[in-house]
């Protein structure tokens, strides 16, 4: 077949040779300018904020490889309390000063009502519909509804449930004191069970002694068991996949390509993007089934789990809000988010407390004395007891928790995004700037925490000079202002109850098989690279 255009037609379609070169050159120049504008546009708005020189495309990612988790402390020393850090093309303005954190998180909150959405989340609708990443009015309606559920009486009513899981989980400790207990696994099972019961009203059965778990899973293929298996797969296995997903890496370097590439790769068998997509779709559909089933349950009114309470709260909203803000996919997402936000964080903090106390016998002695002074081992403390009746125990055990949180801060960065132009620390930041607070830098700053590398719970003694002199926002492990963590009281209650039960019955020492110093994995939240391995002795 003749594919050549007739001369007249070809002239009409192709520019004449005198025009050809200028058209090509101007197209190339326009493309080049477009690329430069795309790559450097976000930088331009914040160029006056100090920061180290950047590597094209990679930004400051190589510095992370060089300095590891200390990178932000190193840069804060060099560039001051507000500086630029480029995640690929995306500049972050890092805030490493308590007063500036107060300004961003509280005083100028109306300019920072939302979190920036990082690339792993940008490709996951399930994660974007929870409280963490919803924005503006939708967020405030959701948050107020959730806060109405988190009444002190609700938390107090959870104590017996929490305690029963703690007791079940610690049966697994029964003692072969020559063997290692991987406490970080045990505490993750415990925290997942507790939040599973509190969020969904179901028993995931992970903390049950092993034999019972096997009995339970035999022949049991209900939605919940399948769902939790899939969830555990996604938070353990898939975490590795997420870091290897091509679209997520592209999201970091060239976000404009992330969604088209994800759409393409999720159709190609064997790619990480396809596996991430499959797991997300699977979890979402299982969640939707659980939510639909609970919505239609006749006796739901008497249930006290988060999902039932949210469905009840939804009924009190206007028809419009119930239909949009509390559409079933959002209810699923916000319930699932509890499981995600409440399990790894709480279990990490409990494990690090045990690890740190096990390495500091003087702290252990004080803690055990306080706990023993409470009374017989079988008396369960009430919420009121936990808060008021044991000032010494409460203060000291809380100090152990606080100091553990400070020492290994589970969320060393807290994200915000400007919704309008605003001035912070003498710099004008345009709308859309990613501003990240750095509680991890504050927690290791000797100005607020002298000898920061020492584990010393007494630094939080309310009557001590160190506590009195410290800036009120130097310690913000649960974030700051209206967007701070909603689960703080829940997790502190669970951690305190766990410590009381554990130290009433056991003492712990580091296993000789544990690496020294402890190695950590830096993901969205902090984790242990090789787990926390302890030797357990039963107290008589
Ligand atoms: C030791 C345990 C925990 C730590 C250290 C922790 C830490 C944090 C931090 C740093 C934030 C960001 C706050 C900010 O941006 O200012 C946050 C937000 C959040 N946390 Fe937690 N968290 C913990 C436990 C929990 C639990 C148990 C739940 C659920 C019951 C939970 C649910 C959430 C939610 C939903 C948000 C988003 C709040 C919003 O945007 O309105 N967290 N958490």
Image (tube, rainbow, N blue to C red):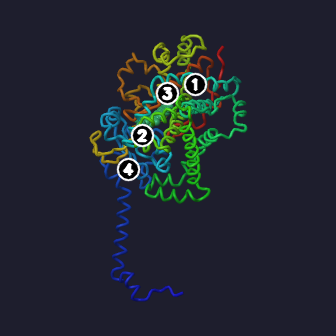
Q: Residues within 10 Å of mark 3 (few under 14, many from 20)?
A: many
Of the image marks 2 and 4, the number of the one nearer the N terminus: 4
Helix, strand or loop at label 3? It is helix
Residue of label 1: 161
Residue of label 4: 53
Q: Residue at x 72, y 37 (%)?
A: 218
Marks 2 and 1: CB-CB under 8 Å?
A: no
Which one is in front in this view, the residue at disc 3 or the one at disc 4? 3
Residue of label 2: 72
Q: CA distance from mark 3 to mark 1?
A: 12 Å
Q: CA distance from mark 2 to mark 4?
A: 15 Å
Q: Residue at x 41, y 41 (%)?
A: 319
Q: CA distance from mark 2 to mark 1?
A: 40 Å
Pick whichever, 414 or 387, lies toward us.
387
Pick whichever, 13 or 292, lies toward us.
292
Position of residue 162 measured from the top left corner of the image (x, y, whole percent): 57, 25
Which one is in front in this view, the residue at disc 3 or the one at disc 2? 3
Of the image marks 4 and 1, the number of the one nearer the N terminus: 4
Position of residue 461 measured from the top left corner of the image (x, y, whole percent): 43, 18
Q: Which label belongs to residue 490?
A: 3
Q: Residue at x 50, y 48 (%)?
A: 124
Viewed as shown, does residue 346 lie left or right of 218? left
Using the image, determine if residue 278 lies above or below residue 529: below
Which one is in front in this view, the residue at disc 3 or the one at disc 1? 1
Which one is in front in this view, the residue at disc 4 or the one at disc 1? 1
Marks 2 and 4: CB-CB under 8 Å?
A: no
Which one is in front in this view, the residue at disc 2 or the one at disc 1? 1
């Amino acid at each position: 077949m003749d594919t050549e255009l007739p001369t007249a037609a070809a002239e009409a379609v192709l520019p004449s040779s005198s025009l050809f070169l200028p058209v090509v050159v101007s197209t190339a120049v326009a493309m080049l300018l477009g690329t430069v504008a795309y790559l450097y546009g976000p930088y331009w708005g914040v160029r006056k904020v100090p920061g180290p020189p950047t590597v094209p495309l990679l930004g400051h990612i190589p510095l992370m490889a060089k300095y590891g988790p200390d990178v932000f402390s190193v840069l804060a020393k060099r560039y001051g309390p507000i500086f630029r850090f480029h995640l690929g093309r995306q500049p972050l303005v890092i805030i490493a000063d308590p007063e500036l954190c107060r300004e961003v998180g509280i005083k100028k909150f109306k300019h920072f009502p939302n979190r920036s959405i990082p690339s792993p989340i940008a490709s996951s609708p399930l994660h974007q519909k929870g409280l963490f990443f919803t924005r503006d009015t939708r967020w405030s309606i959701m948050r107020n509804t959730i806060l109405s559920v988190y009444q002190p009486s609700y938390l107090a009513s959870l104590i017996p449930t929490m305690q029963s899981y703690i007791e079940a989980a610690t049966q697994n400790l029964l003692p072969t004191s020559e063997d290692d207990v991987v406490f970080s696994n045990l505490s993750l099972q415990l925290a997942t069970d507790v939040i599973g019961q509190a969020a969904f009203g179901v028993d995931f059965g992970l903390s049950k002694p092993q034999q019972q778990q096997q009995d339970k899973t035999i022949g049991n293929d209900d939605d919940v068991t399948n769902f939790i298996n899939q969830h555990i797969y996604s938070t353990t296995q898939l975490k590795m996949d997420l870091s290897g997903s091509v679209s997520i890496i592209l999201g970091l370097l060239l976000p404009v390509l992330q969604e088209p590439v994800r759409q393409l790769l999720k159709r190609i068998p064997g790619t990480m993007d396809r596996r991430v997509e499959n797991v997300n779709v699977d979890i979402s559909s299982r969640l939707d089934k659980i939510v639909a089933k609970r919505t239609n349950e006749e006796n739901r009114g008497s249930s006290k789990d988060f999902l039932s309470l949210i469905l009840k709260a939804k009924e009190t909203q206007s028809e419009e809000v119930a239909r949009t803000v509390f559409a079933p996919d959002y209810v699923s997402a916000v319930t699932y988010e509890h499981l995600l936000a409440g399990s790894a964080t709480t279990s990490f903090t409990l494990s690090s407390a045990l690890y740190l106390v096990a390495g500091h016998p003087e702290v252990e002695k004080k803690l055990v004395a306080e706990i023993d002074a409470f009374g017989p081992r079988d008396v369960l403390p009430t919420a009121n007891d936990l808060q008021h009746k044991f000032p010494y125990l409460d203060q000291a055990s809380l100090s152990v928790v606080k100091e553990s949180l400070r020492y290994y801060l589970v969320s060393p960065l807290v994200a915000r995004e400007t919704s309008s132009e605003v001035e912070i620390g003498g710099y004008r930041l345009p709308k859309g700037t990613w501003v990240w607070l750095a509680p991890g830098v504050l927690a290791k700053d000797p100005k607020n925490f002298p000898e920061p590398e020492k584990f010393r719970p007494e630094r939080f003694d309310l009557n001590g000079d160190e506590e009195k002199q410290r800036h009120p926002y130097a310690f913000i492990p649960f974030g700051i202002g209206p967007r701070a963590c909603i689960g703080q009281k829940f997790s502190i209650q669970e951690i305190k109850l766990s410590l009381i039960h554990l130290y009433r019955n056991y003492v712990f020492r580091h296993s000789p098989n544990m690496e020294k110093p402890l190695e950590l994995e830096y993901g969205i939240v902090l984790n242990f690279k090789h787990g926390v391995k302890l030797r357990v002795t039963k107290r008589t």
